[in-house]
Amino acid sequence: MVGNTIDLSYIEEGDGLADDITHFWESWDDARNTWKKRAKENEQYLYATSTRETTNSDIGGISGEDDGWSHSTHIPKLTQIFDNLSANYLAALFPNEDYFDFVGNSLGAEDKRESVRDYIKTKNRLNGFESQMSQLAEDWITYGNAFCFVTFEVKSHEDPDTEQVSTYYVGPTIYRISPYDIVFNPLATSFERTPKVWREVVTLGELARRVEESPDRADWSKEILEKISNNRIQVGHDAAHYGEDLDKATQLRFDGFGSISEYFQSGYVEVLHLFGDMYDKYNQKLLKNHVISIVDRKFVIRNKPIKTWSGAPHIYHVPWRRRRDNLWGMGPLDNLIGMQFYINHLENARADAFDRMIYPDRVIEGDVTEPEDSSAPMKTYYIDEVGQGQVYNLAPDTTILQADFEIQRKAQEMEDYAGAPKQAMGIRTPGEKTKFEVQQLMNAASRIFQHKINFFERNFLEHVLNAELEVSVRNLNFADTIEILDLETGARDFAEITKDDLTTNGRIIPMGARHFEKKAQDMQNLVQVLQILEAAPSVAQHFPAELMARAIEEALDYRNFDLFRKYGRLYEEAERQQIIQIIQQRLQEQGMMGPNGEQPTEQVPQSTGGNPPGV
C-alpha cells in the first residue's frame, strides 16, 4: 500500500530521530501551502465585517480608493451558508438522545447492549461530546477536513483544605485537532494507516501533568521532562541577555513563535507526535504501529507501540469532498469564494453608481458664472449671453440597477452549490403545492445534504464512538456509575458498571442521520396511506387500526412519551362520562340541602280563604 510506511534514520538515536520527525513535519506542512492559503481566505470571508478584511480589497475600481471602491459593504452570504449547514448537520446527527445503537456480532453480545448504550450515553453527557462534535462539524464545513483524537482520562481535584483527592470524571474523551496542527502523506491510500505527525502546543505544567497522571504515564520520560525544564531556565536567562546571538547560532524556528529565544520565553512546549509504521533504513529495522513524541524539536520523550485493537492510533479524519489521489478534502465553501467575491463586487459597484446618481458629474460649457456658495443644495448659475454657455448633468447608466437581480441570483446559486437544505430554512419554491408535494420537494432538495451527513456518520462518527468503547474496555479497572433512563416512567436511575459489562463482540452504529431521513420518509408514506384508506373503505378494513397507530408512533419517534394505549380514548371517554355523572349527582345533592347543610323543611303557604293549594 502506497504511503503506509515512513523511512527514518537511526530510530534508536534520539537527536537524529528528532531531526527526521521535524523534517517530515516541515516538508508535509510546506506541501499544503495552497490548502492553507485557501483555508485562510475562507476564514476571512466567514468573519469579515467589511470587504477591507477580505481579498475583495485587492480589486481595482473607479473611485481611486485603496480597496477599489468608496464603499466596503460585505454581504455575509458565505457566513449564512456556514450557519445553515452547521445547524442542520448537528440536528440530523443528534435528533435525540438515542442517536446510536449497539449491534452484537456473537452469541450473548446482545445481552450487553443496554449496558454499552447507557455507558456511552452517560459519558458523552459528561465529557462535552456534542460540543466537540459541533466544533468538528464547523471544521468540516470551513476547511473541508475534520480531525479528532480519542483517549481515556481520569480527571481529579485536590481539595486545598482537606488535601483529599476527588475524582470527578473517568472515561473516554474526544479532542478536536485543528487541521493546521496535523500533517501526513497526502498521496497515501488510507488516512488510517498512513504515518502522520500531530503538533501540540502545551504549557510545561500541562506536559508535566500528562507525564505524572495520564493512564500511559509510564511511557513518558521524566528525565526528558526535567531536561527541558532546566533548559528553559538556562536558555531563558541567556535569551534575555544574548537573544539575538542565540537566534543566529541555532537558526531554529518554531511555528507561531518565530525564533528560538521567543519560543523559550513563551512558556509553551511544542510536542510533535509521529504515528505509524517506521523503517530504519540504516539498521534495516521495522517498527510497526508505533508512536514517537519529541519536544523542542530535539528530544524524544516517548517511543512506544500503539495499544489499540487495530494497531492504528485513535485519530480520525473525514473530508467533505474527496479528491482524487489526495487525502486532503475540499470544503463546501471552497468553490463559493469566487461567487462571494463577485456579489461583494456588484454590491459596492452598485452603491458607487447610486452615489453618482445622487451626485452626478456636472458639465459647464461656455461663459458661465458659478455660485459662490458651493455647499448649497440648490445652486444658481449665471450665463452672460444666451446660447454662449450651458450647465447640465451627465446622465448615469441606469442598467446598474439590475445588479440587485444578479446578486439575488448568485446568492441562490451559492445555496444550491453548497447542498444546503433550502426547505429547512423556510425558503419555499414558487407555486401552490399539497403537503405531500412539499415533502417530496424537501426530500429531493436535501439529497446532497443527506448524502454528506451520512458520509460523516459512517466514516467518522461511527469510528469515534467505537474508539470510546475500546479505550474504556482497555482502561476501566474498577466499577463506574452510569445513568439509566426508564422509558416507561421517564425516571432516571443509577447503576454500577464494570469492564466485564462492556467487554463484548459488537459494534456501535450511529443512527442519527439515517434515522432523521428514514423517519421523514416513513411519515410521508403514512400520510399518503391514510389518505388512500380514507378514500377506499374496502381497503381500509385490511389495515388494523392498532398497527397503524403503532406505525405512526414509531414514525414520529414518540415512544418515549408512551402515547400508545390500546383503545385508550374509549377508556378516557368512559372515565370522562363517569366523572360528569358524579359531578352532576353532587350538584343535585347540594341543591337539595340548605345553605348550612341542613335538610330544608316544606313551607306551607298561609291560606287566604277557600281551599288550601292542591285540594
Image (spheres, rainbow, N blue to C red):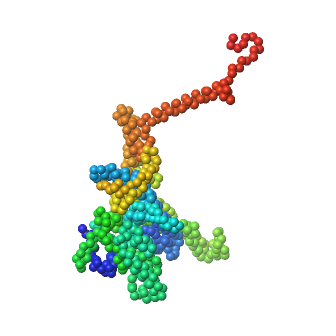
Q: Position of residue 575 (x, y in %)?
A: 50, 33
Camera sees residue 138: no
Q: Answer with left or right where residue 598 lies relative to residue 365.
A: right
Q: Position of residue 308 (x, y in %)?
A: 31, 64
Q: Answer with left or right where residue 362 lies relative to residue 499.
A: right
Vertical relation: 304 (above or below) 249? above
Q: Residue at x 49, y 70 (%)?
A: 51
Q: On the rendered image, what quadrant is the C terminus found in?
A: top right
Q: Residue at x 37, y 35 (%)?
A: 544
Q: Quadrant of residue 8?
A: bottom left
Which residue is nearer to you in this view: 114 or 44?
114
Which residue is nearer to you in this view: 230 or 235?
230
Q: Residue at x 32, y 56 (%)?
A: 503
Vertical relation: 114 (above or below) 324? above
Q: Residue at x 33, y 78 (%)?
A: 18
Total tally of numbered discs in the picture: 0
Q: Quadrant of residue 282?
A: bottom left
Vertical relation: 249 (above or below) 540? below
Q: Position of residue 463 (x, y in %)?
A: 34, 60
Which residue is nearer to you in this view: 299 or 500?
500
Which residue is nearer to you in this view: 525 or 263?
263
Q: Position of residue 436 (x, y in %)?
A: 41, 45
Q: Answer with left or right where residue 41 lies relative to residue 542.
A: right
Q: Which residue is at the far right?
A: 608
Q: On the rendered image, what quadrant is the N terminus found in?
A: bottom left
Q: Quadrant of residue 388?
A: bottom right
Camera sees residue 547: yes
